[in-house]
Image: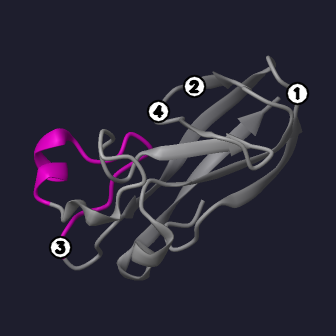
Amino acid sequence: MDATSGWQGTGLTVKAGRRIGIDFQGGGWTVDRRRFPEVGPRGYDSAADQRIWQGCKLDPKLDYGVLLGRVGGGSWFVVGSHDAVTAPDSGPLELRIHDQDHCLVDNAGSLLLKLTY
């Protein structure tokens, strides 16, 4: 998953209620390549998050950089570093970094994930 792109298809089409295995294989991403180091799917810890300008969050309660998912273009959910999630809906699975689309220009990096279904 690329930090400079919004919602990205995974190639998986899932059914509601089914388990999706998500294994973080490596890599890292950042919401500001000039000021903040790369992190994994958990995103930034609260201390680092508080130092980042807060105007680009999709959800002000979540830390920047966390891995998000959605199914079929529906409501998004936190994936983070969980090893599995349950599909809330049926449809194509998409993933992204927690950062608004218009703020992706200063991002960098990518996460390598192994998905099982």
Q: For residue 83, which numbered disc appears in the image?
A: 2
Query: How far apart are labels 4 and 2 at the CA level?
Result: 6 Å
Total marks shown come to: 4
Classify the position of the C terminus by image quarter. top right
Magenta span contains residue 48? yes
Residue at 86% x, 33% y is 90
The main secondary structure of the magenta stretch is: loop
From the viewer's perspective, tell me whether residue 12 is left or right of residue 19: right
**Position above or below: 34 against 26:** below
Q: In which quarter of the view is residue 18 placed?
A: top right
| Alpha carbon distance from label 2 to label 1 | 18 Å
Magenta stretch in the rendered image: 35-51
Q: Mark 2 or mark 1: which is in front?
A: 1
Q: Residue 91 lies in what quarter of the image?
A: top right
What's the distance in space between the residues labelled 3 and 4, CA to CA?
Answer: 23 Å
Say what secondary structure mark 1 lies in.
Answer: loop
Crowding around mark 3 (Cα neighbors within 10 Å: few <14, some 14 to 19, many 20+) is: few
Q: Which residue is mark 4?
A: 81
What residue type is disc 4 on?
Ser
Q: How far across and how far down the image is residue 69, in percent?
A: 62, 43
Q: Position of residue 65 (x, y in %)?
A: 37, 53
**Residue at the image point whose x is 73% and y is 38% from the top:** 115
Marks 2 and 1, the one that precedes in the sequence: 1
Q: Height in image: 41 above or below 116?
A: below
3 vs 1, front mark: 1
The image position of residue 61, as x and y in percent, is 30, 39
